[in-house]
Image (cartoon, coloured by chain):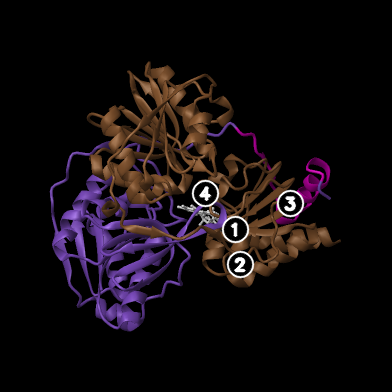
Amino acid sequence: MDILIVLEDNNGKIHRMGLESIAAAQQMAGDLGLTTGALVMGAHGDALAEEASGFNIGEVLKVNSEYVASYSSDGYAEAVKQVIEQENPNYVIFGHTYQVRDYAPKVSAKLMKPFLVDNVAVRSNNGKPVFTKLMFNGKLFSDVHANGDGPFLISFQSAAFSSDKAESGSADVRDCSVNIDASMIRTESESPFQEEAGGVDLTSANIIVAIGRGIGKEENVPLAQDLAKAIGGELASSRPVVDAGWLPSAHQVGSSGQSVSPKMYLALGISGAIQHVVGMKGSKNIVAINKDSEAPIFEIADYGVVGDVLEIIPKLTEALNE
Amino acid sequence: MKIAVLVKQVPGAESPLPIQPDQSWVDEGAVAYMMNESDNYALEEALKIREVNGEGEVVAVSLGPDRIQKVIREALAKGADRAIHIQMETAGAIDPLSTAGLFADALREENFDLIFTGLQSDDLGMGQTGIIIGEILGMSTASLAMATEVGDGKIKVKRELEAGWFQWVSLSLPASVSIQSGLNTPRYPSLKGIMGAKKKEIKVVTPSSPDPTQSLEKVYVPQSDKQTVMIEGSADQIVGKLVETFRNNIKVL
Ligand SMILES: Cc1cc2nc3c(=O)[nH]c(=O)nc-3n(C[C@H](O)[C@H](O)[C@H](O)COP(=O)(O)OP(=O)(O)OC[C@H]3O[C@@H](n4cnc5c(N)ncnc54)[C@H](O)[C@@H]3O)c2cc1C
């Protein structure tokens, strides 16, 4: 096969970004006249293979090895590397998930082949793919290509492709064996856990007032708290506000925090980096206030104000309280 | 415990990013540089480990042209013992595999117990250099560390997973760990630290640049097809229009 899609497990189902990867690979296959295959592994390999076989993919490969039953970066990197060596794809497609961030660079190092990450689009230029990648936290885009011979590792950003666009079909499943032993696994993992939310439930909020680094300092946070109260909304934030200790982590919206879709999301001093945007772009109405007219948040905002949040927030609270 | 911390100089969050006429890169002369955010947390974590252990060495390592000596000095002022500067022009270069190879060459002989990097740079956002270096040097690796515990020839790392989940992973040493921002409170350099930094060693190495395995064609400002209604006027007018929008268009009041 020419394109190998590596599918990630999400409790027995294909991770949403895996479905997006299928859509991406199908587009690339169409544009460049290439064949596809998908790879599944882990304790839920059978269920994932079954689900994957319902898509328009050349074939589904299933790795059976006790060393990939649960995730370890060493085990997964070695398994994917060996499958690539056996199958010789030219492109290996991943979703840009946290797990992929953890082990795919190791595959790149083992093969000495580049890993082109975090792409939002791909197009063909004279039969060669050119990838569009975010840079500078989403403030600029770039066009990037791989040099030399494949295999090339490629990851796509969340929602770069719509999972609904993944074409269904019927694919055969083939077992694949890899040669891994216990000495290759240098890590030991405990069970995943979640931290206490401390009574903050952003997911059911109708209105969210979210602050970013643009709030300036901890002493300004109460301004936003007052606004949230005046408008009847929940207070949320971007990561740097939590990192600085100005709000507890339960308030964080984004890929590491909560995903929300309120009727109105008021983004105050938030630049609109992709890791924040993935957590709030489903909001029905996005209102952004930012002093930088070129902030990426304005690319997704329904309503925008170029201005100083420290000036506008108190006045807005006052007007709402009247 | 001998720890290398990779610190990168990147455009600050508020820096202008004018694009060069040929779109090959940003106009670096107009950029306001600073230390990459997660690297600052990585440095703090290394310094804390050294302080808790009461011994060991923290070496700041950076790759780039002369201008990066500013972040190297900053790392030394905060407490790194010495530094390695891999001298290289980097404008428009985007290949983590080559970069990681250069770091691995510079670090190999030093036999570090730990390599810490920020989880990704705020300019390229590749998020892989530290892990590739670890793999090349035969170290165990983990990404997105939100806490670390060192002891018994191991490092335990609290890895951030998606959507508010975490997982503790124990790694055998030597290990290369990428650090997520927020895991500690980075210090500011003291006046004594700033003075002392001037006397610390910066070893400069000048390797030749390898052939890149991936290349940049151009950078550009993203175009959006979203229609954003811009609300303008004086602050009072803006507030009036916002309340109207909340009430009549979004219907949340
Ligand atoms: C693996 C990973 C996971 C991550 N997870 C998350 C996550 O879950 N959630 C998250 O939010 N981020 C996350 N991030 C971080 C993300 O990449 C960005 O760094 C972060 O979202 C930026 O936050 P910000 O917009 O508040 O800050 P900045 O990007 O610094 O933006 C601040 C904005 O405020 C504006 N501003 C400044 N002063 C004022 C003023 N007085 N008035 C008006 N505007 C002003 C500036 O113009 C700027 O646009 C993650 C990153 C990585 C790599």
Chain coloured purple here:
B
Q: Residue B245 lies in magenta, yes or no? A: yes
Residue tagged 1: A252
| Front-most of residues A271 and B244 | A271
Q: Which residue is mark 4?
A: A275
Q: What amino acid is found at the position of numbered circle 2 in the picture?
A: Leu
B94 vs A229, left or right, is left
Chain coloured brown in this rendering: A
Mark 1 vs 3, N-terminal side: 3
**Chain where mark 2 sits:** A
Q: Amino acid at mark 3?
A: Ser
Indicate whether B20 appears above or below B144.
Answer: above
Q: Earlier in the sequence, mark 3 or mark 2?
A: 3
Q: What's the mark number on residue A247?
A: 2
Q: CA distance from mark 3 to mark 4?
A: 21 Å
Horizontal side, residue B50 vs residue B231: left or right = left
**Residue occupied by mark 3:** A204
Magenta segment, which residues? B226-251
Question: Residue B27: x and y, percent?
Answer: 34, 46
Marks 4 and 1 sit apart, C-alpha to C-alpha, by: 11 Å
Q: Is residue B36 at least partly visible in the picture?
A: no
